[in-house]
Amino acid sequence: MRVGIIGLGVISRFYLAALGDNGPLRLAAVCDRRRAALAPFRGEVRCYADHRDLIADGGLDGVVVTVPNDAHAAVCRDLLDAGIPVCVEKPLAIDLADGRELVALAQARGTVLFTSFHRRYNARVRDLLLGLPPRWAIDSVRVRYLERIEEHAGLDQWYLDPARCGGGCVADNGPNALDLVRMLLGPVELTDVDIRRDELGVDRWARLLLSAECGATAEVELDWSHPGETKDIEVRLADGGVRHADMLAGFAGFKQSLWHEYAGVLRAFALAVHDGGPDTAGLAALELVDAAYRAEGARSDRGRREADGVRHVGEGAGAPPG
């Protein structure tokens, strides 16, 4: 399976390492606007500065998209329109309408659209899943995704631009955490949200509360200002038992768990291309992210109306009688 990679930022190295492991997937082309990023691949694989040229030359069985979040929709749209299977980094898009359009286009073209949720393939998460009873026996789930974003972004400073990232921790880390909740509980709905932003408008901390059709509840905590790194899952069972998975346990060193997780992503992508069929997990996570931001907006609007009401009452109390 000949694979291209569009976007050679901080995440691409994990895909590149997995493609170099002599598996069934082979790197055939790379694309990035930066000449320096392409330089190591000159003479080895086809190199492009524009993804449309990569598409036009053909010869690819699938493409991995790791461009900044705000470019996901446009690049994926072009690939799907050309009938090329796509593995796109989460989030699927930064706008829900774009995400829905991409899923509809993939279905219309009969082409695979696969969202990369790398934590699905974490060894500790897999161990947890294998040891759990059915969903109806789960009482609650808590997923924590805590890190200092500046340590993880590297040269990809677009993470700290809300317009390019889609927001902050809810838009970028939220999909991974929400996907884990859905793996454990099935379909869920947002019930409450608390989001805190910095002076630039980046949401750096959030708590999302959810409820599942099976009756269980879930809590997702996200933090982009956390000292160090914490990524874990706690599952409380109806019988009082508690199960735990530390996604970083056993992987000494910064980002060390990602090597095997992205190998898992590519194996799953290859299987999806072989078997076909729609993948709606990316859209489901995006719908929850959109619901969180809409709930935050509604709460802010309500707070402003209440504050205005207090001010109006205060002004009237001090006014002379008519």
Image (spheres, rainbow, N blue to C red):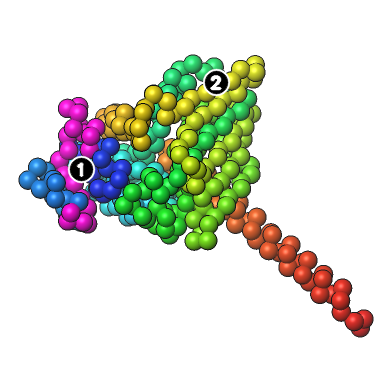
Magenta stretch: includes residue 81:
no
Q: What residue is shown at x 42% (from left), y 25% (from top)? A: 249
Reply above or below: 187 against 303.
above
Label 1 sits on what residue type? Gly
Residue 112 lies in quadrant: top left
Q: What residue is shown at x 49% (from left), y 38% (from top)? A: 145
Q: Are marks 2 and 1 in contact (CB under 8 Å)?
A: no
Tell me the SS state at disc 1: strand
Residue 304 lies in quadrant: bottom right
Q: Is residue 70 visible?
A: no
In which quadrant will I find the N terminus? top left
Magenta region:
16-36
Tell me the SS state at disc 2: strand
Residue density around tag 1, few if under 14, some if 14–19, many if 20 or more, within 10 Å = many
Say which residue label 2 marks.
Answer: 243
Reply above or below: 307 against 189.
below
Query: Mark 2 or 1 closer to N-term?
Result: 1
